[in-house]
Image: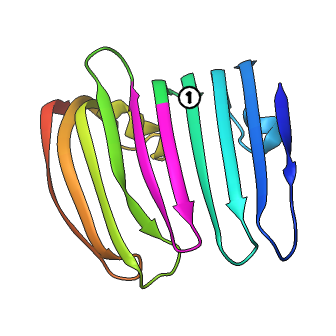
Amino acid sequence: TIQTGGVLHQSRPSDWALSAEGTSWPDLGTSGFPGWQAQRTQLDLDWHGTLDDWEYGAQLDMDSITWKNVTVSNLECVLSGDAKSTTFWIEGREDATSTWGGTGQIPHEPTGPLRAQLLLKQVPLGWINSWLPQQSVGLSGSVDGDLAIQGTRQSPEMNGWIQSNAAEV
């Protein structure tokens, strides 16, 4: 189900809203995402302003999304922004003990200030196997970690740590 509505003016303030909900999206590949599947998805987006000066807010909730052997359950993402930057919060999990999340602000200009934080708790290394060439190294186990990113998109500075938990290559 998709609902949308609003008024868009070229030179004065406008408002637009979009809401999309689905119980099962068996193959998002038909919309340009081959191999992706999603269960119970809710997306809400609000946009306000003029074409030169605007702001928006968005929220995405999914029971699960899968690509190859990677399944993320209870995915939640909140975005807000304006013509200069986007602020985000995202969290997901594979199971009751494996969680990951991030928060931060990303500038639209490459030289604008960047800040982000990524936290990992018992994230399966097997997820990486989906991106490795077949017949290459296989990974198992899990990792914990914390990564902070500052600077600019053009020149990011990263600081953090990763700790393996019974990792095997």
The C terminus, quarter of image: top left
- Res 22 → quadrant: top right
Residue at (27%, 53%) from the top-left corner? 117
Q: Is residue 90 visible?
A: yes
Q: Is residue 169 visible?
A: no
Q: Amino acid at mark 1?
A: Asp
Residue at (74%, 71%) from the top-left corner? 50
Q: How is this picture coloured? A: rainbow
Q: What residue is shown with label 1?
A: 61
In the image: residue 156, left or right of residue 162: right
The front one of 56 and 138 is 56
The N terminus, quarter of image: top right
Residue at (47%, 82%) from the top-left corner? 110
Residue at (76%, 73%) from the top-left corner? 51
Does the magenta segment cover residue 92? yes
The front one of 163 and 24 is 24
- Point out the residue furthest to the front here: 12
User: Mark 1: which secondary structure?
Assistant: strand
- Point out the residue furthest to the bottom here: 111
The front one of 21 and 161 is 21
Give residue 134's position: percent from left, percent from top.
49, 41
Does the magenta segment cover residue 39? no
Which range of residues does the magenta coloring cover?
76-93
Q: Residues within 10 Å of mark 1 (few under 14, many from 20)?
A: many
- Res 92 → quadrant: top left
Give residue 28's position: percent from left, percent from top.
74, 33
- Res 166 → quadrant: top left
The front one of 57 and 130 is 57
- The secondary structure that most of the magenta stretch takes on is strand
In the image: residue 5, left or right of residue 69: right
In the image: residue 43, left or right of residue 14: left
